[in-house]
Image: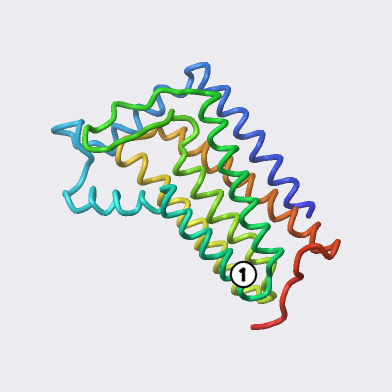
Amino acid sequence: MLVGVILVTIFVLGFGLLASEVVEGDTKAFDERVLQFFRAPANPSLPAGPPWLKEAMRDITALGSTSVLTIIVVGVAGYLAVSGLRHAAAMVLASVALGVLLSNSLKAAFSRPRPLIPPDLLVFTASFPSGHATLSAVVYLTLGALLCRTLSSLSLKTYILCFAMFLSGIVGLSRIYLGVHWPTDVVAGWLVGGSWALLCWLAMIWLQGRGEVEPERAGP
């Protein structure tokens, strides 16, 4: 619990400092330099690398889309409910829904313009923080943290959390590579999503202690 609280504090402070720098324009040079690294030297309007890499990144970025994340969340919540963990299922749905609301509220509050968007990619919202990075972190890390509270095996918990972080990481990187987000947008999304996942994990521990959510299960 103490480690969780400390990490949440660090993530929230980190987001606050980053947001302050972004608002003041102090990250502009860094953002432009990193974006340029991922662009083709001969034609900066195109991403670097072979054509198949761009298509792969488009596939990866879909892992952070609203439609894909909704399917995953509903599927996990349904599995928990069928397994008899109905309170845990409700916790998953509530945690993700509130996380989505938090992400959308932050994007509306900052209203940061995006980089020059490639014509073949459609976007509908502001840039900061990255919605894909935030929501993928909210969903994958929150699901990972909450699922770990229903398991007793340390190896399973470690695997789930590492894979959740991997998914959140590659989704964020794909947004930078495709040129639809500034790097600081993605970092901010990771900080927000990580903070929310930790808060949900702490809430799960507290509710399990009160007997309002199913406790950890014994098993492999």
x, y percentage for residue 59? 30, 54
Amino acid type at mark 1: Leu
Tell me where residue 11 sits by quadrant: top right
> Looking at the image, is 67 positioned above or below residue 184?
below
Relative placement, left or right, of 144 versus 177 is: right
x, y percentage for residue 215? 76, 70
> Residue at left 69%, top 44%?
8
Q: Are there few (<14), some (14-19), or many (20+) residues within 10 Å of tag 1?
A: some
x, y percentage for residue 187? 50, 38
Q: Nearer the viewer, residue 124 or 16?
A: 124
Relative placement, left or right, of 152 versus 18 is: right
Quarter the C terminus occupies: bottom right
Q: Residue furthest top?
A: 24
> Looking at the image, is 206 positioned above or below residue 8?
below
> Looking at the image, is 39 positioned above or below residue 82?
above
> Residue at left 22%, top 42%?
48
SS at badge 1:
helix
Q: Which residue is mark 1?
A: 80
Quarter the N terminus occupies: bottom right
x, y percentage for residue 162? 53, 62
